[in-house]
């Protein structure tokens, strides 16, 4: 795969030199900083940006800062012999990858571009690894739900937003009934399938771009429903309960079923002094859940 290089320069000698490089480099040229930034704003369009210190309407410090914000392309600076000292200062201050002096040989240019292409690959690989680590630290490995840590970071913000703008916010806390007995009788693999079944059923019911689900503990989950009155959340909770009651897992020829208990609570703008803190919101939902379980399980209890 060739490296895509954007050259921001009006210097025809530099442009000719760049176009003389081998087929590993796909060269595009633009003469102004505005056109360069417009080209770089397309995500993933360029791997390397080669900037002439004398490019039209270019203020190097501001330009390289904008590059860092808009693109992951590896930045290079080109400068003539008379500007090398000031250009080197720019390179050091702005974390520009390399300084290419002019005039320059084709061999030197290709070596710098190869090094820059390798740097781009290293940075891309590191970004993917960081993203993977972040996903692993924020999501439950079995169910794909968010972790409790994320709940504790995100739910207070959701609640404060609802209070500020007088919007509804509801939460659904659910617990799988008798999961311990299922694990003991049929093994943890069967129990895990019920856990993933809850997560999947919830995702099919809620709005993927608005609502979200967290795994609270071994066998309980919490679903957050912004912009949703508690009555609407109760309807969603009942659909979830019904869906799980119909789920059957085959355990070596034996059909296994279980149920969930659900507690629902929420914040309503017409009662602003009620359920207006993270702790009180979870406490009410947890108490509703415990009452549902103590009443025999397989039921939804709504506690406004």
Image (cartoon, rainbow, N blue to C red):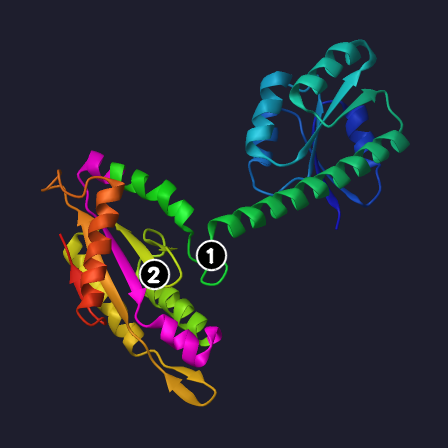
**Where's residue 207, x and y in %?**
31, 57
Q: Residues within 10 Å of mark 1 (few under 14, many from 20)?
A: some
Give the vertical position of 207 relative to 201 (above or below): above
**Could you say which is closer to the camera, residue 165 or residue 96?**
165
Q: Is residue 299 left or right of residue 85?
A: left
**Could you say which is closer to the camera, residue 191 or residue 269?**
191
Q: Which mark is residue 140?
A: 1
**C-alpha separation, residue under disc 2 versus residue under disc 1:** 12 Å
Q: Residue furthest bottom?
A: 253
Determine the residue positioned at 80% across, 36% down.
Answer: 115
Give the vertical position of 300 relative to 108 (above or below): below
**Where's residue 86, x and y in %?**
73, 10
> To which quarter of the image does residue 80 belong?
top right
**Where's residue 256, x and y in %?**
37, 82
> To which quarter of the image does residue 241 belong?
bottom left
User: Which circle, 2 or 1, is nearer the viewer?
Assistant: 2
Asked which secondary structure carries label 1, the reply is: loop
Q: Which residue is mark 2?
A: 220
């Amino acid at each position: 795969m060739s490296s895509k290089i954007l050259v921001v320069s009006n210097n025809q000698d530099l442009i000719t030199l760049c176009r003389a490089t081998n087929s590993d480099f796909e060269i595009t040229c633009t003469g102004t900083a505005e056109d360069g930034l417009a080209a770089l704003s397309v995500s993933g369009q360029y791997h390397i940006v080669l900037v002439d210190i004398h490019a039209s309407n270019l203020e190097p410090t501001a330009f390289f800062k904008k590059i860092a914000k808009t693109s992951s392309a590896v930045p290079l600076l080109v400068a003539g012999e008379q500007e090398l000292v000031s250009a080197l200062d720019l390179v050091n201050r702005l974390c520009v990858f390399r300084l290419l002096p002019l005039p320059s040989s084709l061999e030197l240019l290709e070596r710098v571009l190869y090094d820059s292409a390798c740097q781009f690959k290293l940075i891309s690989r590191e970004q993917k690894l960081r993203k993977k680590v972040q996903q692993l630290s924020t999501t439950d490995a079995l169910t794909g739900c968010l972790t409790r840590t994320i709940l504790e970071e995100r739910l207070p913000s959701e609640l404060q937003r609802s209070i500020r703008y007088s919007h509804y916010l509801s939460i659904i806390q659910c617990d799988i009934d008798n999961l311990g007995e299922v694990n003991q009788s049929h093994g943890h693999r069967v129990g895990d399938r019920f856990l993933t079944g809850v997560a999947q059923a919830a995702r099919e019911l809620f709005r993927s771009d608005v609502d979200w689900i967290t795994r609270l503990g071994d066998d309980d989950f919490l679903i957050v429903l912004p912009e949703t009155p508690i009555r609407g959340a109760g309807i969603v909770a009942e659909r979830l309960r019904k869906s799980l009651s119909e789920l059957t897992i085959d355990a070596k020829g034996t059909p296994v079923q279980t149920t969930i208990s659900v507690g629902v609570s929420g914040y309503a703008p017409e009662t602003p002094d009620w359920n207006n803190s993270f702790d009180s919101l979870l406490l009410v939902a947890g108490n509703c859940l415990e009452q549902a379980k103590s009443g025999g399980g397989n039921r939804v209890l709504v506690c406004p």
